[in-house]
Amino acid sequence: MLTTPGFPAGTLDDEGCPVWTTSLYGPDHLMFYLVRDLEPAAALEVLGADPARAVPCALPAEASAGLDARSLPATVLDSEAETVLLAGRVRGWTFVMDDANTTEDLGDDPAAALSAAAGGPAVSLHIDINALNRLRYAEDGVPVFETDFDNVESDVAELPAGAPAVVRAAIDAAGNLDELIEDDEDDPDRRDHAFLDRLACALAGANWTYDELRAADLIAVELD
């Protein structure tokens, strides 16, 4: 069972990704947002959704139950909408999953917008089937750290001396799974393919299990 300093047993899947994120997968690309001290309905509103249209969304006991080509929340709702946003709150952090990457087009940096609304930290993670993953981290509405799949190794290795302590702590928490690195094993800066996903979640301490996720009061909104 895979583990890192910040992700104990049961919080990572066999590919080293946080289980609470991969349990929701479906389409080819999606967005995850994490924001501190902002209610799920308010986060949805910042991202352009009408929280009045939100409905409860109870996830199945098993993450794979009923999962088809759609995301898990879209499957649960039997939704044919272009996009489904799922939101909830776990350990003081609100998450929003956008299962079609629709919200990334709302302004220059939705993570900074969420951070500004909350008056605290926020993270966005764009996950793409072609490994074009991108992470953004903001505090008090100001972008603080950004990296992507192609540059994360150099960005982490060359982190400026003045980088926020939370970023350094998240790097340590995300760890490195050497057993998943298939080439360039002698490169000390080499990171496994799921490192970026763990780093994004580590910035929010989101090492949640699937059971923690489904125990939260989850709401979903369809966007046409």
Image (spheres, helix red, strand yellow):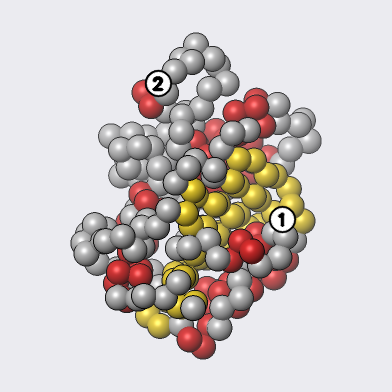
Please state if 127 lies on the left or on the right of 80 as rendered: right
Q: From the image, tell me which residue sits under label 2.
A: 182
Q: Is residue 92 visible?
A: no
Looking at the rendered structure, the secondary structure element under dot 2 is loop
> Residue at the spot x=42%, y=53% of the render?
28
Residue closest to the eye, 166 or 154: 154
Return the mark for residue 162: none
Please state if 68 lies on the left or on the right of 130 as rendered: left
Picture quarter containing residue 77?
bottom left
Instruction: Look at label 1 and name its amino acid.
Output: Glu
Instruction: Look at label 2 and name its amino acid.
Output: Glu
> Residue at the spot x=69%, y=59% of the render?
109
Q: Residue furthest bottom?
A: 52
Q: Earlier in the sequence, mark 2 or mark 1?
A: 1
Please state if 53 lies on the left or on the right of 109 as rendered: left
Estimate the x, y position of residue 190 in percent, counting from the top left: 53, 22
Q: From the image, tell me which residue sits under label 1.
A: 139
Residue closest to the eye, 128 or 139: 128
Task: Judge the density around disc 2: few (<14), some (14-19), many (≥20) Cα neighbours within 10 Å.
Answer: few
Figure check: 60 above or below 53: above
Task: Judge the density around disc 1: few (<14), some (14-19), many (≥20) Cα neighbours within 10 Å.
Answer: many
Q: Residue furthest top?
A: 186
Residues under labels 2 and 1: Cα distance? Answer: 35 Å
Q: Is residue 77 visible?
A: yes
Estimate the x, y position of residue 163 in percent, counting from the top left: 74, 38
Picture quarter containing residue 9?
top left
> Residue at the spot x=21%, y=62% of the render?
65
Picture quarter containing residue 33?
bottom right
Estimate the x, y position of residue 10 in percent, counting from the top left: 30, 44
